[in-house]
Amino acid sequence: MKKVGVFILLQIICAAGFSENPRWKVFGTPIPARADLDVRWDTPPTFVDFNVPTNKWPSKMWVYRTEPREFSHKAISNLMLLGPFTEKEIAQQDANGIMFRSTDGSTALSVSFSSGSIRYDTPEPHYILKPGIFKDVPETKDLPKLTKSFLKKSGINPSEIQKNTNGAPLFYFSDLGYEYLFDHAWTTNTWGRLVVCRRSVDGVEVIGNVCRVQFGEQGKISKIDLSWPGLKRYKSAETLRPQTVIQLLRQGNAYQGLIPMGFGEINWQTVKSVTIKQAWPCYFAGDSELYPFLDLWTTVETPQGNVEIEIDCPIIDETRL
């Protein structure tokens, strides 16, 4: 911004348009205002829009209202097969959802229409010091297919899974098992594998809408923790320009994420520069809405050396909604 009048107007918009307790704030420490803070965009800058790196800045983003999700009768029937459950094992049922509990109380399934969530829980296997006791636990490579199948049977379109920068669905995996000494050697009884994926809306990651599914022997699902409510577009607003984002950081309208272990605290009054390397538009899933914000991946230059940290800030002006 070269013209003084435009710069002053920009400062007024930044000061008036952003709350001290923004609706998108997930975690982090407020970055104190500092007018002379050297903030710059990497060259060329990378804007990660719709999960594909690009140099094109998104023009607008929506605010979504959350709504109940209508799980179909077929979807409920498919979920009942997990137990398996029958209508005799319905523990609670009303307009907001349905809950099943096994006769011995060890296995439970709850489906909430109001929040669009599914919870399924079974007991974990006992600690067994015998190799190879758990049979046909799915391999990691098979988990994406199994997860997509579960989502389809639950009435959720797998295309809504967040994608990586190559456009493929993004999954996170972890093994579940017991490690112990057996015959003078370390061995592991892997009794299950966990897969986690996040939701995307308009191709943008949603923080708070998550699917966690645990698979055990014979590929059977042993646990589910899913939050995937219905959505309706409410209002849209133009996104802030990159130059405005620089002013946000200088005016204290941003939040610092976690610092790598061993680096220590950042004294923002002594920071030499902040280089924005990537910008990821995101949504935060609140109680009643999805609200957009900007996730910045930055290199912060300090007297103690450079450190890579995440910084969150607004991506739209709330006063324009």
Image: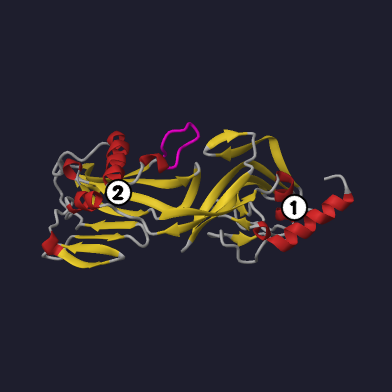
Q: Position of residue 107 (x, y in %)?
A: 18, 60
Residue identified by numbered label 2? 213
Residues 190 and 164: in front is: 164
Residue 94 visible, this angle = yes
Q: Position of residue 291 (x, y in %)?
A: 54, 56
Q: Is residue 167 magenta?
A: yes
User: Is 184 situated above or below 96?
Assistant: above
Q: Is 187 situated left or right of 248 in this image?
A: left
Farthest residue, direction top: 166
Q: Position of residue 70 (x, y in %)?
A: 33, 55
Instruction: Please give the name of the residue rendered at 38% of the width and 59% of the height, measured from the top-left corner.
Output: 68
Q: Position of residue 108 (x, y in %)?
A: 21, 61
Q: Is 105 situated left or right of 60 in this image?
A: left
Q: Residues within 10 Å of mark 1 (few under 14, many from 20)?
A: many
Q: Please report the bounds of the magenta region as a residue range.
A: 161-170
Residue 296 visible, this angle = no
Farthest residue, direction right: 4
Q: Examine the image and state in which quarter residue 131 appears.
A: top left
Please tell me whether mark 2 sits on a helix, a strand or a loop. Answer: strand
Q: Is 195 situated left or right of 320 in this image?
A: left
Type of amino acid under label 2: Val
Q: Is 91 situated left or right of 306 in this image?
A: left
Please tell me whether mark 1 sits on a helix, a strand or a loop. Answer: helix
Instruction: Please give the name of the residue rendered at 65% of the width and 66% of the height, measured from the top-left corner.
Output: 20
How many marks on residues? 2
Secondary structure predominantly adopted by residues drawn in magenta: loop
Q: Quadrant of the N terminus?
A: top right
Residue identified by numbered label 1? 247
Residues 226 and 93: in front is: 93
Q: Is residue 82 magenta?
A: no
Instruction: Please give the name of the residue rendered at 57% of the width and 39% of the height, measured from the top-left corner.
Output: 48
Q: Quadrant of the C terminus?
A: bottom right
